[in-house]
Amino acid sequence: MRHLLHFFQLLLVLLLASTPLALSQTSSHGIDLTDLDRKTEPCTDFFQFANGTWRANHPIPASMTRWSKRWQSGESAKDRLHDILEAASTDTNAPKGSSDEIIGDYYGACMDESRANARGLDPIKPWFAKIDSARDIVALEQVIAEMHDILVQVPFALGSQQDPHKPSWVLADLSASGLGLPDRDYYLKPEPRFEEAREKYVGHVTRMFKLAGSDQKSAAAAAQTIMVMETKLAEASLDNVALRDPAATDHNTTFAQLQAMAPHVDWAGYFRHQQIPTDVDMNVDEPKFLEEVDRQMHETPLADWKLYLKWQLLNSVANSLSAPFVEENFAFNEKYLAGTTEMKPRWKRCVESTDRYLGEALGQKYVERYFPPEAKARMQEMVRNLLAAMRDDILSRPWMSDDTKEKAMAKIATFNPKIGYPDKWKDYSRVEIRRDEFFEDMIAGRKFVEQDDRMQIGKTVDRGRWGMTPPTSDAYYNPLLNEIVFPAGILQPPAFDMHAVDAVNYGAIGVVIGHEISHGFDDQGAQFDYLGRLRNWWTDTDLKDFQRRAACVVDQFDHYYIEKDIHHNGKLVLGESIGDLGGAKVAYLAYQKSLEGRLRPADLDGFTPEQQFFLAWGQFRGDEIRPEAQRLMVQSDPHPIAKYRVIGPLSNLPEFQNAWSCKSDAPMVRPEGKKCDVW
Ligand SMILES: [Zn+2]
């Protein structure tokens, strides 16, 4: 189950926002004409038409893997966080223990690069000593429990998770973890690109061990040992597609069952350390994985486990150590795997680190300065309109029975939109941050994040919690809470613009809202009922029809190639693609509905309101992406690449064909019988 949320959180970093929302009234405007590539026909390649010139004129910066107006504005949002943090770090009057002091000191310590460089490996030496001192596997398991406290959650992870059968309650969730490569397939697939990645990974692990003081021979041997252990863990793990199925990770487990599943793990000791009673309600995502952990605990030599833990620790904290570690980590994870050629400046990495561990302390400052109440009110209205349109859309579906429709209406009625920022902020006053030691601050931040999560276990769910920080330029749907969440960071141009015409806002943030609502009815979301329970609410016939419609989308995306022999995995991107298809459709309906009883808006710059709507989506989604990042995404990310998030849904929509008067054999019009129609 944890992975379910993990994927929603992967939605992360759509990164928006360029200029602060101006509060003064300016004249309204439509889409940006200079983005268009007029040499391309909209009915041929709408992605190129809507946004081709912008992409041609704005090459991807060396430190980024993707680039578009929304990535650009997301980076600008970091400039604002930078301003906040620079001010906080130089403010000598900040009260002791205040958010200002905490984020200012954290950022100030992070910026002291020479201190990090002077310390070298010193910050993790106590951890290495702890690992080395373990005399047996039980002692080593105690170290594993301590590593979990600082978010080095290997080889399995513990987290809080709503009970999918009683979503008002939070249980303890044990999930699979512990791989250094992006996912299972990297260890197991025979294709040359995966084989190469494995070779490079072994080289990378070797170099990290050398930086940590090993000689070449023992570092290389350590890397081989780790590769063997991780490959076995990978074999026992579910793949990306299986992990999208909520039922595949739904295993209510008692403590006795857990002990029987993995008898060589000292679970009593582990639970004691985590301060969780053994009679806690618990879910084990992947029992087979824990069985493999158990086998290795039993059969793998203690010395190998020590190497594995040292590696995982190094891998997790490399970015907070001295320059050689930071550089080696960058060279493999960002340069080799994702294609970035230059590291982000330190201030930006420090901004990101503050957001990661002290996110609501920083976020509170952000919304005070950059999120006007008018933006929230406007969003609330749009969300209401989108939900109403989704209701109409579902009711109009001839294939769905009244019985299933009634259940769907109940689900729409309990949708909870969260906009901007949490009503109640997290209290960071007990986090001990010092101005002079960044590594210890980072560990304190991690402990806070871990404790904050751990404390939810065995309690009634707190519905006010947020899974993203306010400055995040992204949005998510959580099926267990049936909530759609839009942090302040996404409520900026080009997604949301107080001064743009309605067609543009509905085409950009409107489709994002519709996308998140549609997640409630995608292949995952549709398995959760109006109370967030993992429980079927469909009649058999309706469910079969829904699955047949979803299979059309799987087939559509299976045919989108990014290279000669690499195509999207339709099953992996199914949820997101249903979200985009439903999102575009429902936002279009909501826009049309908003025009009822009003004078039809004028054409702008030669484009009808409907054309402006679709152009806004094409421009909002207009990423250019590096080939390496594209390969990584197609392999591991449930989101399709931007090109197909434009072409994919729009080529299914008769509304798009009509708006642009496309001939029925145009490339942007899927032939009859191949058009997918879910929502
Ligand atoms: Zn999504």
Image (spheres, rainbow, N blue to C red):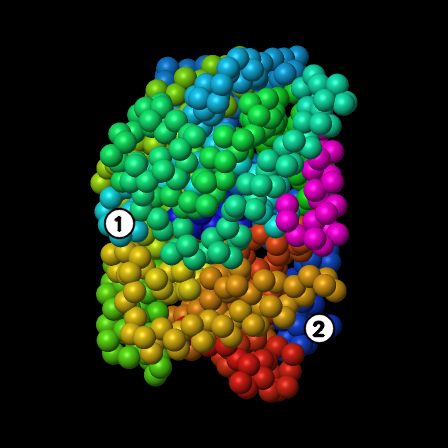
**Residue situated in front as seen by the camera: 465 or 606:** 465
Residue shown at the point (70%, 49%) measured from the top left: 194
Q: Judge by depth and name the residue closer to the eye, 441 or 246.
A: 246
The quadrant holding residue 514 is: bottom left
Q: Pick whichever, 27 or 148, lies toward us.
A: 148
Residue type marked 2: Thr
Residue, disc 2:
40
Task: Report whether residue 68 is seen.
Answer: no
Of pointers 2 and 1, the one earlier in the residue sequence: 2
Res. 309 image quadrant = top right
Q: Is residue 667 visible?
A: yes
State yes or no: residue 332 in magenta: no
> Mark 1 sits on what residue?
167
- Start and end of the magenta stretch? 187-207
Q: Nearer the viewer, mark 2 or mark 1?
A: 1
Secondary structure mostly seen in magenta is helix
Amino acid at dot 1: Pro
Residue furthest right in the image = 216
